[in-house]
Amino acid sequence: MVVVLLGIVLLLFFLPNYWAKWVLKRHTRGRDDYPGTGAELADHLLRRLGIDEVKVELTEHGDHYDPEAHRVRLSQDIYHGRSLTAVTVAAHEVGHAIQHHRGYPPLLARSRMVKVAQKAEKLGALLMMAAPFLFLLTRVPGGLLVVVAMAVISFGTAALVHLVTLPVEFDASFNRALPLLKEYVPPYDMPGARHVLTACAFTYVAASLAGIMNLGRWLVILRR
């Protein structure tokens, strides 16, 4: 029974991330019948929609839209790729640029929340590392428990933020990117495009679960 429960837990943690990576990789085959690369499509869509303040850049830090710099940043494979994954991921990031351009409130809230999540995660890791030393220095009864509780809250906040921003990802995928892709992607490729768009959104689920696993790892370390 314990083994079964453990297997279910591991599936819940690893399946979203594995599935998203599998879907993205599945559709990376080069397509000569596509008129342009991911970067070229992204730039074309931005110009067509009149979002002239946003530029497309190559990055080594994962595909994303930066609302502060007004940049759609694409990884090497997406920027130069001429595949279903490349054009679909590019369109998804343009979807975030559209949200920003039109003042989509959940995106603006998410931008603030992501900063909080990043700081919370760093604070949580720092507190977890410092907890044993703080306890030895202060010897305050319950002090270690307080520090660990604060760290748990910090990690939990980061995981929660990733989950509550999921609707923003689905909006970028299916309300912004999908209608545009229907004009550029052949009909027989649209089921694959939908799978890729879902995978783009589920990267945040994977990030949330990774945060929870990170919290569990620290708790196991502190129990030793």
Image (cartoon, grey):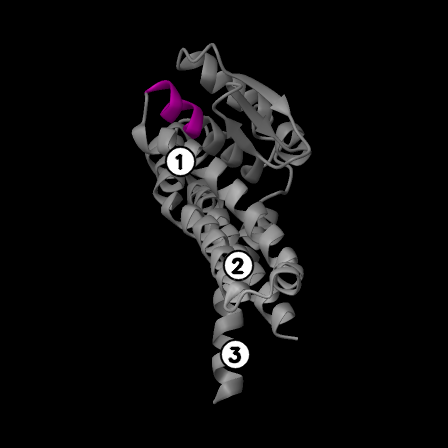
The residue at which mark 3 appears reads as 6
Find out whether residue 139 is within the magenta segment.
Answer: no
Name the front one of labels 1 and 2: 2
- Residue 138: quadrant of the picture: bottom right
Q: Residues within 10 Å of mark 3 (few under 14, many from 20)?
A: few
Residue drawn at x 47%, y 89% as measured from the top left: 1
In the image, what residue occupies the spot 69% across and 33% down?
60
First in residue order: circle 1 vs circle 2? 1
The residue type indicated by label 1 comes to Arg
Residue 68 image offset from top left, x and y in percent: 50, 21
Query: Horizontal and vertical percent for residue 139?
Result: 60, 66
From the image, give the main secondary structure of the stretch colored magenta. Answer: helix
Q: Nearer the viewer, residue 161 or 26?
A: 161
User: Residue shown at 53%/18% (left/top)?
Assistant: 43
Where's residue 215, x and y in %?
54, 61
Closer-to-camera residue (145/152): 145
In this picture, is 22 found above or below 86?
below
Q: Nearer the viewer, residue 91 or 213?
A: 213
Q: Nearer the viewer, mark 3 or mark 2?
A: 2
- Residue 147 circle label: 2
Task: Estimate the spatial distance between the alpha carbons at disc 1 and disc 3, rounded to whole Å.
Answer: 33 Å
Q: Which mark is residue 206?
A: none
Residue 84 appears in which quarter of the rendering? top right
Separation of marks 1 and 2 at Cα, in angstroms = 27 Å
Say which residue appears at 36% left-offset and 47% top-offset: 164
Magenta extent = 95-102
Is label 1 or label 3 in front?
A: 1
Q: Circle 1 is placed at which residue position?
A: 110
